[in-house]
Image (cartoon, helix red, strand yellow):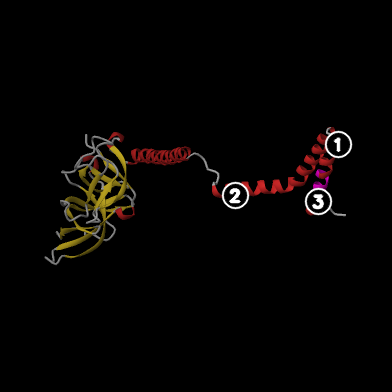
Amino acid sequence: MRMTMRRWFWLLNFIMLIAIITGLHRPGAVNWVRDVAGQSIRWVLTPASWTFTRVQIAFNRAIHPPTSANPADTSMQEHYQNEIAMLLARNSTLERLLRESRLIHRGFPGISSQQLRAANIDGFASDSSDTCILDQGWSDDKRIRRGCVVMAQLSVVGRIVQAGAATSVVRLLTSRRMAPVTASIVRPTRDGQTLIAGLCLARGIGRGRMRCMLEQNLGAIPPQRGDLVLLNDHDWPAEVSGAVIGVVTAVTQSRHGNLRWDVHIRPRVNMQQTRHAVIVLGR
């Protein structure tokens, strides 16, 4: 016969009744009956007590969820993670600059390594594509100042017109606001190069372009597409004399006279697609 809760209830009542009657006649037997009854009651009620305890624990967790790690500890951990990420990124940048500096010092003939400073191009001025911003300023090197020549890929591209503490503004040769520069035009050959024009006043016309006018002197070799334009200006540092500033893209008859060539020039380096430059520092 299966003992149900109801049957256990009546059985315990019967035992208690016997204990009361027995206790009236034999007081010593009461303790034994009480112990047996207590053990029986605890055994019967244990499943219900365990269930109630589990329910209470679950309810407490729902109302008061266990707190996570200390917020202060979490904040400190995130702080150190951010610091490590930043330091690793800076270390990577410095390693890249070191590699570039070594290549620069080997690849710029006639210029002392102490005169060169690697820089990144941060962007261009909002009002012109012919003015760029470098990530180097006088706080990086006190010799960075107005007038310093800027080169890219061994080609002269402009000069610093404003040197700040952390950045510098470079006006490119293609800018309309840049003073015209004296240049010469040569044609590369297998044996070296042929001089096409000894003097050519190249001026920027904006949007990454330059132009110069050439007199059609008797016996002069006409310039043509692909000729190189070299810096030949005494107002610029001697270290960059003869550096390439552009390449001839077209030659037309000048509208101001049939005895002049209108030479169209584009920079040797497309600054819109260049990320790095070199500053030739003052002495």
Residue 49 is marked as none
N-term-proximal mark, 3 vs 2 = 3
- Structural distance between the alpha carbons of marks 1 and 2: 50 Å
N-term-proximal mark, 1 vs 2 = 1
Give the residue type that dot 1 points to: His
The question of residue 193 being in magenta is answered with no
Give the residue type that dot 2 points to: Phe
- Structural distance between the alpha carbons of marks 3 and 1: 23 Å
Q: Is residue 264 left or right of residue 58?
A: left
Q: Which residue is mark 1?
A: 25
Find residue 189 and report its horizontal and vertical position in percent: 31, 53
Q: Which residue is mark 3?
A: 10
Find residue 103 and report its horizontal and vertical position in percent: 37, 40
Magenta region, main secondary structure: helix
Q: Which residues are magenta?
A: 8-16
The question of residue 12 being in magenta is answered with yes
Q: Is residue 94 left or right of residue 25?
A: left
Task: From the viewer's side, name the closer residue of 38 and 87.
Answer: 38
Residue 59 is marked as 2
Find residue 18 and report its horizontal and vertical position in percent: 84, 43
Which residue, as the protein is rendered here, is positioned at the far right? Answer: 1
